[in-house]
Image: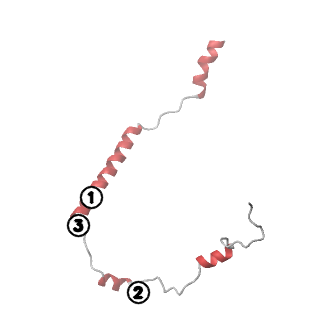
Amino acid sequence: MSPDPHAPRTQEQSIKARKHQLFEDDDVVSSGPSLPFPELLKVTPAEPLSPAIKALLWVVGSLVVLMLLAALLTSGGRKKPKKAGASVAPAVRALG
């Protein structure tokens, strides 16, 4: 049973209609800060990190440094590429 090609498609909408629905301008208030930055700094209290968070950051940072050092030490530096003619020459000598 195939669907009727002349039946209205209720689930499909035109791209323009969907675009209008998605990007419809609601009454958007300015997204900027309500106070100037110097005043915002005066109002906002400074909260230092807890010792547990500091310890966690030190552990994660140490692991990153250790992984970097391990990667650098195991890479062994750049290896020289083999010459293309060096691997072909023994095979040519055997045939000749």
Separation of disc 1 and disc 2 at Cα? 35 Å
Report the number of numbered marks.
3
In the picture shown, does residue 6 fall above or below 82?
A: below
32 or 26, which is in the foreground?
26
Gap in angstroms between the C-alphas marked 1 and 3: 10 Å
Q: Are marks 1 and 2 in contact (CB under 8 Å)?
A: no
Type of the residue with mark 2: Ser
Check disc 1 and report its element: helix, strand or loop.
Answer: helix
Q: Earlier in the sequence, mark 1 or mark 2?
A: 2
Disc on res. 56: 1
Say above or below: 47 vs 52.
below
Write the residue at 30% across / 81% down: 44
Q: Position of residue 8 (x, y in %)?
A: 73, 73
Residue identified by numbered label 2: 34
Q: Residue 64, relative to residue 52: is it above or below? A: above
Mark 1 vs 3, N-terminal side: 3
